[in-house]
Every structure is written in structure tokens, then in C-alpha cells.
Amino acid sequence: MSNKLLFPFLYLTLFVGCAKENPQLSAACELMSNGTYLLKWETFPPIEGTVKVYESVRPDSFDLSSPVFEQDIQRGYKSVLAIPGVQRTYFKLVFNKKYSIIAAERAIPTQGIFNLRDLGGYYTKEGKQIQWGKLYRSGSLAMATGYDRSILTKLGIETIIDLRTEKESYYYPNKFNAPHIYNLPLRGNGHNSFFEEILSHKMKLADILEYDRDVFSFILENNTDYFIKMFDILLDEKNYPVTIYCFLGKDRTAIASALILAALDVDDETIAEDYLLSNELIDYHALVRDADAFTIDIQKAITALYSAHTETIRYSSELIKANYGSMDNYLEKELLLTHKKREKLKSLLLY
């Protein structure tokens, strides 16, 4: 199954130090159809000078003696040739030899897997950055092609956390064998149980948002044991790099990813933006046979069923805060993620 991925810009904001005169930096990396990376950058307030860009296949190791190019900062963009066959590319942008930022394409091109992307690059409230190349989220690896498996191998995936039910795992086995595979079958109804209701007109477009919120609430309230195990896995440095996945990487994986980002002190707006990226990486036409044969109303309902909705992630966050007072209280009291554990998680995942 071919999956046509869009490559949205990855916007990162870096507060370099605490001094007010230091600029905020943002960078974007997009893989173009002509085989080039388009790099864009911005500073606020605008600064003059030179940006030097370095390239590496490792996000933690750059040869600073040999920039790929130098450019006037105010130019704001530059294309770089992507080298065929080379594993994932990372770019380090250094502004006036003072301030730097690392960028990479977030979405990873695949053939059969939906929604594979890197959770690296996001910034915490304290200005630290999540390390690139250590934590991925994805749709089902049961759809992986040979090409996809080679991509996962190049990413060096050490651990897979499969959030699908035992039934899903039995009928659609994982097609990538990492050294460590953990099945944490989150409880909650999947989309397939509602697909027939849409086709029979029992569930309409207006019902989808309420259903989506109910699914998220149920998953959060009935899978504490599995989320505790997930964090235990993430607290073992030998398990990295890690990929977390479910059917589409939109619901169960979205909740798991949101909890991890929250534990790392990423702000709510960034968490919501990451959640909504699924809308650009999932094509329901590739999932639903003869989708064009359905009526417009059914097509809209199916699209909404497979879409991420802003209201859903915000409702879930508000629900946690209403029940526990804060996300921090929820993580500590419900998921047993103590301050000490969170600090260890940050030491493993943040620059």
C-alpha cells in the first residue's frame, strides 16, 4: 500500500539562555519532491549576520569545521541536496557563531506505515530540546513494507511499544522485529467498531467529536497500569531508540505521546500541534476500500473518524486538570511518575 506523505514544516522555538537580548530562533526542514531539503529559519527580533549550516546523519555529532553552506541570516532559506541512500539527515544552524538550533524533517517517508514521525526537536518550558532520533510515534508496523523495515533499521530502533489489543496483534502481526518488543494492549473501542455504524447511518458526522472525546477519556481512565509500564520502559536507557505505535498512531499513540511530552514539560499548545499532525499524515482513502463510492455524508463522517480534533486533546487535558488539579499531580499520583523519575526521563531525552 502506497502512502503519500506530506512533509509539514517543523517549527522550533529556542530561547537561548535567559537574557532578554538573546533572539528566539526557529527553523524548518522540508524534504521536497525534487530530492532537496528546503531549510527555512527566522530570528526574533531580526538579526543581521551569517548563518552556517552543518549536516550529519547523527543529531548529536556535527563536524563544525565544514559547513554545508553559509548564508545571510536575513535571506531566511536555502535548498540542500538530499543524498540518495543516506540515512536520516540532521542540520545544525549556527547564527553568528553564538546561537544554534538543530532541525530535521519530523515526518519520515514510508510506503506502508502511516504517521511515522520523530518526537524530537520540541522545546520544553525551560528551553531544553527533546533529542532527535530517540523517540518515535507511528501507525501500525503490521503494514510495513521491505522499504519501511529498512528505514526502521537505519533509525536504529531498539524497542517497540505496541499499544494494540491482543486481537489486533494476532491478526495483524508486527512486521519489524526490534530487539525489544512490549505489547501494552490499551483498553478501549477501536475505530473499526464504529465503521459499520457510519455505513448504516447510525453514527453521523455530528456524533464523531463526542465519540472521540469519550474514547480518549476511557483510555485515560482505564489504562493506568499500562501507562505506568510504558514509563518504566522509557526510564531504561538501554531501550532507546523507541517507537510507540497503534493502528493509525492517532488515538492510543497520541495519548501516550501527549503524556510523555507533558512529563518532559512541553507546553499544551505544542502537544496539541503534535497531535494534529496526524491529519497531514493519514490518508483515509488508502485505508477504506472503494471510499469514493460512498455518499458525501459518509465520506465526511469517515474522514472525521480518522482525523485528529483540537477539541479532543484539549478536552482530555482539561479533564485531567479537573480531576487531579494539574497534569503534574496526575503524572505523580496516578502514573507514579515521581519527581525523581521525571528528572531521569528528562536526562535521557533532553539536550
Image (spheres, rainbow, N blue to C red):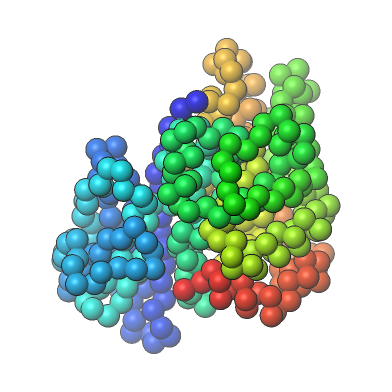
Residue 115: x and y in percent read 52, 42
- Residue pictured at 37% horizontal, 56% vertical: 104
Q: Nearer the viewer, residue 78 or 140?
A: 140
Instruction: Determine whether 104 is above or below 332 in the image.
Output: above
Q: Measured along the vertical axis of the image, is residue 225 above or below residue 35?
A: below
Q: Which residue, as the protein is rendered here, is positioned at the far top?
A: 293
Query: What residue is shown at x 54% (from left), y 69% (from top)?
Result: 349
Q: Is residue 239 visible?
A: yes
Q: How many marks can you see?
A: 0
Residue nearest the observer in this picture, 348 or 36: 348
Which residue lies at the image location 66% right of the left edge and 34% below the top edge?
A: 173
Name the spot of residue 219 as percent of width and height, x first: 77, 49
Q: Nearer the viewer, residue 21 or 27?
A: 27
Left or right: where does residue 61 sit relative to residue 172?
left
Answer with left or right where residue 75 lies relative to residue 348.
Answer: left
Which residue lies most toward the front here?
A: 179
Residue 166: image quadrant is: top right
Task: Work out whether 166 lies above or below 350.
Answer: above
Whether residue 330 is visible here, answered yes or no, is no
Quadrant in which residue 302 is drawn:
top right
Q: Position of residue 30 (x, y in %)?
A: 33, 48
Q: Residue at x 74, y 50 (%)?
A: 184
Give percent across and percent down for residue 147: 43, 35
Q: Is residue 233 left or right of residue 286?
A: right
